[in-house]
Amino acid sequence: MAFVSVLQIPNVDSDQADTYKCFAINPFGKAVCTAALNVIEGRKFIKVGKRKEKQWNEGEIDPRFWEVLLSAPRKDYERICQEFGVTDFRWMLRKLNQKKKEREAEQSKYVEKIHSLKQIEVKMDGTAEFELDMKLKDPNSKILLFKDGEMLDYGDGTDEDTKHNMQKFGETYLFSIRDVGPEDAGLYQVDVEEVNMFSTSLASEVNCFVPPVPDVELNTTLKDTKVIEGQDAVFECALSDPVPQITWCANDISVEHGEKYDIAVSEDKQVHKLAVKNCTKEDKGVYTAIAGLRSSQGTLDVEGKLLYFLFSGSHGKGDGLDLDGSGRDGSGDKKRTRVDHGVHFLNGLSDTAANVGESAELSCKLSSEDSNGLWYKDGKKLESKDGIKIVKDGAYHKLIINDCQERDAGKYKFEAEGRKSEAALNVKDPPKIDADALSKFSEPVIVKAGENASFKLPFSGKEPIKIQWFKENEELLEGHGVRIEKSSTHSRLLLTKCQRKDTGEIKIKIKNEFATVEATSKLTVLDRPTPPQGPVEIVESSLSAIEFKWRPPKNDGGCPVTNYNLERQQLGRNTWTKIGDIPGQPTYRDTNIDRGRKYCYRIRAKNLEGFSEVLTTNDIAAAFPGSPAPPKIVSAFKDCINLAWLSPSSTGGGSIIGYNVEKRKKGSNFWSQANPKDDPIRVKDVIEGVEYEFRVSAINTCGPGEPSGPSECAIARDPKKPPGKVKDLKITGSSYTSLSLSWTKPKEVKGEEDEAKGYFVEIRPTDQLEWSRCNTNAVIQTSFTAVGLKSMVMYWVRVIAVNEGGEGLPQSFDNYIIAMPPPVKPKFTDKKMKSFMVVKAGNTVRVSVSFEASPLPDITWLKNGVPVAKHVTITNFEKGSQLFIYTSEQSDTGIYTVNVKNMVGQDTFTIEIRVTDDPKPPGPVELEQHIQGTVTLSWTPSPDEKRDNHLHYMVMKRDSVKQTWLTLVDCLFNNKFTVINILPGREYYFRVFAKNDIGLSEPSVSPVWGTTKKREKFTYSMPVSKTLDFQAAPKFIVPLKLHAAPPGYECYMSCAVTGNPTPHITWYHNNVSLNTNPNYYITNVCGVCSLLILRVGPKDMGEYKVVAESPLGHDESLDPPRLLEPNK
């Protein structure tokens, strides 16, 4: 049984933003579901975090491919390309390098460095882990975890119920997933703020997540082992492929490395050993090694240190063992003597490994020093000769093999007095590099640019040998500029036409089945230095000297820069004058200059390899200072005016030694000196009540520069009082992003409040404490429109009047203002919107509606009263909404309703969408004749009739005389039709079409109908004249039938009546005559009475009847009553 639990938070605010958990608990366990709530100020909705994903079209590469590849080690590139179907590796590597640069630029915004990326790995305990090291620029930056684009909530690892956790150890961030299951498969991404840092993919196995099962074979199995109590027992197995770790079990219980057990793995990860230390009788049992799907078992037998006792009777009788420990056997006292029960091993042989050329030693220890033994190799007896030495040292017996070779590998056995011990000798031949060759290889290789560099290293070792060359830890492959020679004894790397960028560490890695060795060298490529770096900084530019400096080259070419070569050109001349080489300091002072001239310099860096390219300076001249900014009026009084200004951006190459201040009366063109030498910022030579402007010019060693622009006008008078509050503050208009205000100028109060000269408008969101000004300069008008507001945010608004005396008190509204237009009830504005739409199956459906509403309404689309399906795309915007179905199906047919609702009201619009296709033709047509001169057509319904209640039929006729097709009936909703006026002697052809809102089907053609008229000999005999009465009362021979038609469609009714004289026909609907109603089309042809309703509606439902009247009587078709019922 499924249950739905809903948590609703009315009037949500920012304090409720958090991670919410839902616990479901019953007697069988507990389930937890989490969701993150982010509250965005000013909007009343809940949003679950979702990572913005890049859109991609069919045929393009999945963006997740690059996300995973950017964080993966190089060895996994091939596997990832296979998973995503990428086959062009060269293109992939070029594109990957470009994306790495782009991502590093994005990451540098938030982290200083990121390294040690470890891909996700599932542990034996069912936990998946991945980690990375990164140093954040801002420790408060948000670290987000996503799975397949959905943001995950994570804990700190202290809560055992938390599924996802993150633990921080210094700069290491460890992410873990507990109890991994198939539902945890997906792409995990770590973001800092909005920038991705790391991506890793967790793939699912068949049923659950477990570490990958290695597919290996056991080359050697475990052997049964027998040891004496106190000794160590060793079990060993060899695998066909390297496996980092296998499982060891003792009596079906897993064991781990510790005080009792010693688990060892060879360097090549193929030989695994388990040592049971200080064996006791409790260690006896079956030991198992499990590697992937393979396992091997061996038994351990532990013997005690047995002492046997022989009892000798004093009378020479009763020899035997004292089984009960009494020292008696019933015949007399006995003497107890200790006897050793043969020689045994205190320490047996153990498997040994040795490299080719080294010595190997196999040793064992017997319980007796007097015992001798024999050594065997693969069943053959060994003696001390040919590099083999057999040594006996008391109870110790040793076999020493000098200069081991591959032929010495095998199984060795030592036997002594019936006891034996076996062990294997494994002779390895790892790669070896001669010390002299290694020393020579390690010497740096120095070449000039364009030359070739060669590295050669001899080695030895057992084949097959894998050789790899690396430059700066990037593997080198055969290709442009790289040649690699390999053999069983040496390898050579040739780099052709080396460039400066090829400088770096060169490493060779040699590997075989036994070991891996590496050797490192260094390549230095000498070249000319790169150009000196700009920009050139002007230190001094005066009448007597020009001094400037620059930065050294970014790359010195492999050898230090010794000099800089300079040239100078005077502006206006075409020749360059050589200044010469200067020492290696990047600065120069030129004293040989002419006043007022401009100079340009070219600078080259020089090393032992030559000159760099040129760095050219801009034109430099001994110049006057630039103009300062226009001065600001600090304060004004009736006897002085105080000024302030900013120094010029250009000093002209020298230092500023002073300023000239000039003034003029407003309206005058004459400037006069204003400042005394000892007080440059206070102008005292003013007349009370006169309005002045001021300007300033800077002075350096070359003289005064250009003057600044004029200042604002200032009147020499004492300061004014600040103005009062503005009056009648009100709102004149508003929208989602703006607010229009108007007010009245404050009144002057003599001596307390002076006239206002301008106004400032300030706003403050209700959740903030600081006011912000909407206008930087005071406005003169008593109206203002504040723009740039956030939709539906609440603001406090105030207006401050200002004048020369300062700012007055602010005037604000009593309540906050919401940034929104005036409330408007939702209303659809497009009067041409269709209420019915027919779409062919497979085509796109697009329904757009326009409306006006304030505030922004909630928009809901329904299909037949329930929410629309997931494949239907709804796009809402400020003044409209759109329903979009990319590929329509017949199941999309229905009544679609859009509801637009806000706090003021709501409005609804309904449209019927009918999705159909070209109809399939009806089945075979059969012809029957029941009445002379008529033919009845019947056919099998079209297969689409059950799916489309608007499907109907159209019948057409062609005879052998007219040869044209004539439509007999349309909008026929049954599968039978009677054709009248069939003439003898003609052949008739009929076609039946299925028809729906899209169009016609292919026709279903009937058999030919008709007979040839026989001509007989005409014999005429004059009949006897007799008066006949042909009059007859009206009678219906074909009654009315029940009809059901969809709303909006035509409905055709018919019946047949006979009578002489011709009766008068009257149609009735619910006993109301229809003969004079223009909404119905009534005909009577040869007794066939027809009624056509052009557009069926609910008002047409009811009882219909036909009445035929003549002087001889009347008849009506009402047996039984029929109702017209429109389909709903």
Image (cartoon, rainbow, N blue to C red):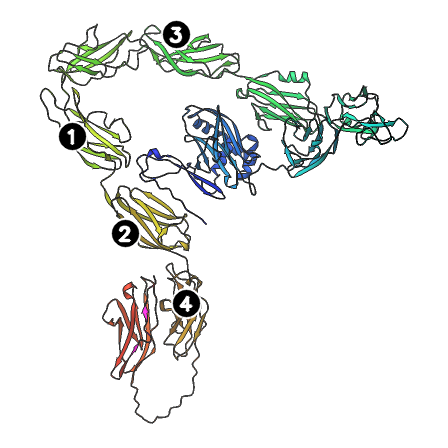
In the current view of this chain or complex, which residue is farthest to the bottom? 1024
Instruction: Report the amino acid beneath label 1.
Output: Thr
Residue 554, labelled with which disc?
A: none
Q: Earlier in the sequence, mark 2 or mark 4?
A: 2
Which span is picked out in magenta? 1115-1126
Camera-side residue of 418 and 816: 418
Residue 832, labelled with which disc?
A: 2
State the separation of the CA atoms marked 2 and 4.
Answer: 37 Å
Q: How many marks?
A: 4
Camera-side residue of 1077 and 392: 392
In the current view of this chain or complex, which residue is farthest to the right? 316
- Residue 408 lies in quadrant: top right
Residue 782, labelled with which disc?
A: 1
Are dots 2 and 3 in contact, CB under 8 Å? Answer: no
Q: Secondary structure at mark 2?
A: loop
For residue 794, side relative to residue 115 (left or right): left
Q: Residue at x 30, y 64 (%)?
A: 1096
Q: Nearer the viewer, mark 2 or mark 4?
A: 2
Instruction: Report the amino acid beneath label 2.
Output: Lys
Q: Earlier in the sequence, mark 3 or mark 1?
A: 3
- Mark 3 is surrounded, within 10 Å at the Cα level, by few (under 14), some (14 to 19) or many (20 or more) other residues, namely few
- The residue that label 3 is drawn on is 589
Residue 992, labelled with which disc?
A: 4
Are dots 1 and 2 in contact, CB under 8 Å? Answer: no
Using the image, determine if residue 5 lies above or below residue 1123: above
For residue 1088, side relative to residue 103 (left or right): left
Q: Secondary structure at mark 3?
A: strand
Q: Earlier in the sequence, mark 1 or mark 4?
A: 1
